[in-house]
Image (spheres, rainbow, N blue to C red):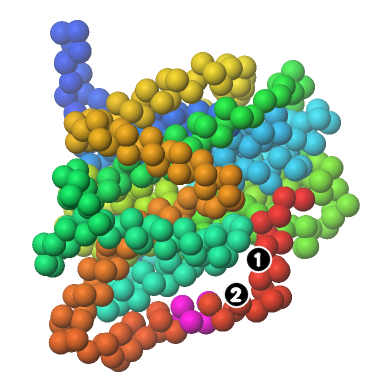
Amino acid sequence: MNDLLSHLSIGFGAVLASETLTLFGITMSIPMNLVYCLIGAIIGTLIGVLPGLGPVATIAMLLPATYALPPLGGLIMLAGIYYGAQYGGSTTAILVNLPGETSSVVTCIDGYQMARRGRGGVALTTAAAGSFFAGCVGILMLAAFAVPLADVAFQFGPAEYFSLMVLGLIGAVVLAAGSLPKAIGMICLGLLGGTVGTDINSGASRYAFDIPELADGIGFVAVAMGVFGFAEVITNLEQKGQREVFTNRLTSMFPSKDDFRRMIAPILRGTALGSALGILPGGGAALAAFGAYSLEKKVGKNKAEFGKGAIEGVAGPESANNAAAQTSFIPLLTLGIPPNAVMALMVGAMMIHNIQPGPQVMTSNPPLFWGLVVSMWVGNVILVLLNLPLIGIWVKLLTVPYRFLYPAILVFCCIGVYTVNNSSFDVFMTAGFGVLGYVFIKLGCEGAPLMLGFVLGPMMEENFRRALLLSHGDFSVFFTRPISLALLAATVILVVIVALPSIRSKREEAFQEE
């Protein structure tokens, strides 16, 4: 306990550290990391409110901007965008029946019906309360499990890391929404994309086709921004129709005593389920929200109200998606393995600042590690203060025609891609991946498995070859080391379980919007 408190004090010191700035001839001390946290929370909420632009696309667009920021400030801002989007997505889901973020899809079912019955304010307060509680629990779990998991990670060698990444990719396939064959195909495409460039061992060029710009491989930012940013813009241009907004019916924001009684258990269950699913590879906020809604329908006492405005249908999913958003940082920060697409982008942000994700961050740079952890709690407080009072402003943004937004988004994307390497080739490559991402959306293929394969592929190859080099070509090294064997056994069990017809049908049912 004393160690945990000392670690958190390090984090608070890093977040609250002031920098001296001179503006218009006035010298002042400003806690810049708090400013970055506020900026991330505001952008995240804005992105959550605006349909179509999720945290993956936004973080992909803002990756180049982190070049100009200090490492901790950049990571705090990107993290704020991620969990801020979970908050903001519930606002439009409830008031407009339009999920701003994938994890808010199930919130539409009962949240919108509550708004139609004049209880939109109660639904918004329920979502905020559940999100804040779940976020705090997720942060405590991150702080509590960070040190033990990091100690375990220090026992990992190349064989263990390879086996862990195999488990991560299989988990991403199993837990991805939609068709299993399509998820496998996207993983394989990502792995193939990661092989382009110069072989780190031999120095030979692979799949570069004598194009000098591909000598260092396909740019991570170009892939992410194209598949998630450009593709989302193209898809949103197809959507038409009027939006019915219920802001004029927000007569009361405070839940009744009966509402409090009904929301407590779903918030607790959603927090527990989301905290567990956030850690799993391929899990994340969307899976947690769908799982929590299915759970509430089975165990809730008011089953007849689901789909007609049940407060449990808002409290459970909103708690689950925010808990998952926080705990998904656990495998990233302690093991260096991204469990979902957003965390894969966070890996890219860390590498931009020459930070190797993994347990060594905790020992080599404690202020950065614990500062990021503490900033999440600060960000949750900021989000509660931002969301409820400013609901009217957020919803007014929905009246802005998308035809005015998308040119600015595309220009911003192109400038960001160009500034990474000052190369117009990267801009054309991003446009190409944007078209490819649009094709994937039309085919019903998720971009997240591709991104995980693209990020983990080179790391897998490096650890695989290093393990064989150390064992003099003996493949048994992956099975004779206990941790590696346990991880591979877990991978096989996962494959066998998901192959069972009953499990496969349950998996597909979990992602069905009712």
Q: Earlier in the sequence, mark 1 or mark 2?
A: 2
User: Badge 2, how many Cα within 10 Å: few under 14, some, many 20+?
Assistant: some
Residue 60 quadrant: top left
Q: Residue at x 65, y 65 (%)?
A: 507
Residue nearer the viewer, 393 or 145 = 393
Residue nearer the viewer, 292 or 485 = 485
User: Badge 1, how many Cα within 10 Å: few under 14, some, many 20+?
Assistant: some
Left/right placement of residue 188 relative to residue 24 reads right
Please tell me whether the stretch drawn in magenta is mainly helix, strand or loop. Answer: helix
Horizontal and vertical percent position of residue 486: 40, 84
Residue wearing tag 1? 507
Q: Is residue 172 above or below residue 488?
A: above
Residue wearing tag 2? 498
Write down the region rendered in magenta.
490-494
Q: Residue at x 58, y 44 (%)?
A: 442
Residue 421 quadrant: top left
